[in-house]
Amino acid sequence: MTSPKAKILVTRRLPEAIEARMATLFETDVNELDAALAPEDILTGLAGKDVLVSTITDRIDADLIGRLPPSVRLIAQFGNGVDNIDLEAAWAAGLTVTNTPSVLTEDTADMAVALMLALPRRLVEGSEMLLRDRAWAGWSPTSMLGHRLRGKALGVVGMGRIGTAVAQRARAFGLAIHYFSRNRRPAGVEEPLGAVYWHDLDAMLEAVDIVSLHTPLTRDTHHILSAARLGRLRRGAYVINVSRPELIDEPALIDAIAGGRLGGAALDVFENRPEINPRLLDLAEANKVILTAHMASATLEARVEMGETVIVNIRTFMDGHQPPHRILPDRLQAPAARA
């Protein structure tokens, strides 16, 4: 006997191929407006549904979880990060939560290194100058001088899949690789990169020219780049963040750049999303900061792979098995699983 199709609510538009596949496999209700749903709209849409397919723009807090229809048993996040979901409340309510890890590694690493190149070489500024002035005076020996990457020291905070992929790319550009991570990587990872492990983040920050953040957001990593730690960076150093905005004390970063201590930052995420701190926008207009619109994983290939992973999680769960990408609250995760 064939099991009935799972009934799912998808809170944002997904790639056409994924929506078509979901419509074949499940009874699918998609938010056609492609804008973040209000909590009440999520609750209304979930009436009689089995699965909530959420994204990072959905705030799935304890209050919302406490009011979910009893039919809902799975929150299948379309994304790697799950800090928009109260995992403790979900666990207490008997809900299973899944995500889509691993599929974003290459694209996110590409984006981090692209920003790492664009920032010291002033690529955005040079392009905007031509578009804005429409009257370029031509090449000059002293025009648009930036800084080369070769010979500089990169500090990777969080040497997991993405951090390692960034280090591999950066090594090809002649950067010396330093890293801070909860666990030291095996020799088979360190040696090809010439990577230097630091057990003390403060000490590493004093030794590098560029910092790139690739650690998950947890209670321990919130504002891991605090005002004090930003003050330890070398004068003129750069900060790259394609991970989570809450990893940086953003006002302190703004102060450090505006005051001339740091050379600049390239940020794909912002603390006050969707609104951006006006001071940060001012720095971008002054070409001290590069801002991109949360684009690190924005490739069609990545979005399709994310959708396929969501489908696998849903089908496995609805077949009565443990989905391959289940997420548990911090207190229930073994250290190895959290690294």
Image (tube, grey):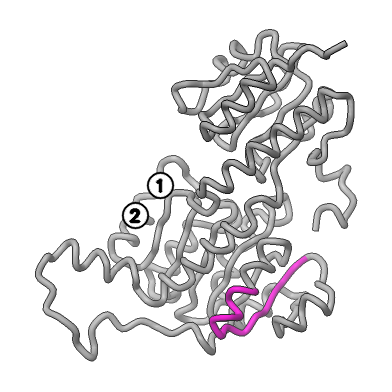
Q: Amino acid at mark 1?
A: Ile
- Does the magenta-highlighted stretch encompass residue 107? no
- Residue in front for this viewpoint, 330 or 227: 330
Quadrant of image for the N terminus: top right
Instruction: Sort mark 1 into few (<14), some (14-19) or many (20+) by Cα contacts within 10 Å.
Output: few
Badge count: 2
Q: Position of residue 265 (x, y in %)?
A: 45, 66
Report the span colored magenta.
168-181
- Residue in front for this viewpoint, 19 or 228: 19
Residue farthest along the top direction in this orientation: 48
Can you say whether 161 is above or below 20 in the image? below
Query: Which residue is located at x 62 percent, y 28 percent?
Result: 21
What secondary structure is marked by label 1? loop
Query: Which residue is located at x 66 percent, y 61 percent?
Result: 162
293 on left or right of 198: left
User: For mark 2, what is the residue?
Assistant: 281
Can you say whether 317 is above or below 195 in the image? above
Query: Which residue is located at x 59 percent, y 13 percent?
Result: 45
Q: CA distance from mark 1 to mark 2?
A: 7 Å
Instruction: Sort mark 2 into few (<14), some (14-19) or many (20+) by Cα contacts within 10 Å.
Output: some
- Does the magenta-highlighted stretch encompass residue 180? yes
Instruction: Say which label, 1 or 2, has the lower sequence index.
Output: 1
Q: Position of residue 33 (x, y in %)?
A: 44, 22
Can you say whether 201 is above or below 301 in the image? below
Identify the disc placed on residue 276.
Answer: 1
What secondary structure is marked by label 2? helix
Which image quadrant for residue 91?
A: top right
Quadrant of image for the C terminus: bottom right
The answer to whether the residue labelled 1 contacts the one labelled 2, judged by CB atoms less than 8 Å apart, is: yes
Q: Position of residue 228 (x, y in %)?
A: 59, 68
